[in-house]
Amino acid sequence: MSKSYVLRVLMEIIYKMDQIEQNQRTLSYNQSVSMKMVEEIKQDAVPKSEVLAQQPLMRECKVTLKKVESSVCKITGEVRDKYMDEVASALPLQNVLEVLRVEERLKVEEYAVAMKAHMFKIKGISEDIPRVVKEIFSDTLMEEYNWAGAAGKKSLQKLSLFETFLSDVFIHQGHASYEKGMRKAVELSHYRMAQRKFGKKQKLVTAQTSPPAQ
């Protein structure tokens, strides 16, 4: 069993614990509303006190898992501060040369683990792929790319950063859903850039047509 696999399993456990805790909060809220509206539902629902009693336990489990993750990292040396700092300072990527550099660095196990850990941190409990991609690729850089490399663009699909690493972070969505999310991320990024260019063009036209100040 590889070190990176152990860390990945721990991260997935923390992710699931976050989801459970969120579900507990939602359940507590729904029960409080139900008890006010319908007396019959109140009698059948799980008592709110039990839900509230479970929340400290969930938080305690989550903290314990994070401590275990930290201990594993310290013992095995998988994630050192310098690698985490290097990853955090590199993103979002701004140009193709930076992409090539990161692709090369991902061949180093410690850097690769740090990159995946940072992606999990950005993702949190969200399943919003475009939001995470925006934190990895700047809109300016995304102009050079699309998912499949069509129409003379470079291919995101050929980058291990997205094909391997980010896809593992969103592994619960499945390949088809992940690809759809990536294509949506590209579309939104291109749209934002088009809007910026249009805005700049409008400002230039306005400046050229405005009468001189008296």
Image (spheres, rainbow, N blue to C red):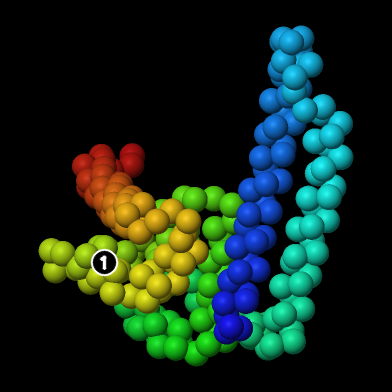
Residue 135 position (above or below residue 94): above
Viewer-proximal residue among 91 and 2? 2
Viewer-proximal residue among 177 and 157? 177
Q: In which quarter of the image is the C terminus?
A: top left
Give the structural element (helix, strand or loop) at label 1: strand
Query: Which residue is located at x 33 percent, y 68 percent?
Result: 141
Q: Which residue lies furthest to the left in this view?
A: 151
- The x and y percentages for residue 184 are 32, 51
Q: Quadrant of the N terminus?
A: bottom right
Is residue 114 shown to the viewer in this render?
A: no
Describe residue 194's horizontal placement relative to residue 137 as left or right. Answer: left
Describe residue 57's horizontal placement relative to residue 19 as left or right. Answer: right
Query: Which residue is located at x 72 percent, y 80 percent?
Result: 72
Q: Where on the picture, by quarter, is residue 8?
A: bottom right
- The x and y percentages for residue 97 are 34, 82
At label 1, the amino acid type is Tyr
Query: Which residue is located at x 53 percent, y 87 percent?
Result: 109
Q: Mark 1 points at which residue?
A: 145
Describe residue 135's horizontal placement relative to residue 50 as left or right. Answer: left
Viewer-proximal residue among 146 and 40? 40
- The x and y percentages for residue 118 are 57, 70
Describe residue 2's horizontal placement relative to residue 34 as left or right. Answer: left
Query: Which residue is located at x 82 percent, y 28 percent?
Result: 48
Is residue 191 shown to the viewer in this render?
A: yes
Q: Where on the picture, by quarter, is residue 94?
A: bottom left
- The x and y percentages for residue 210 are 26, 40
* Number of numbered tags placed on the structure image: 1
Within 10 Å of the Cα at label 1, are there few (<14), some (14-19), or many (20+) other Cα atoms? many
Residue 209 position (above or below residue 78): above
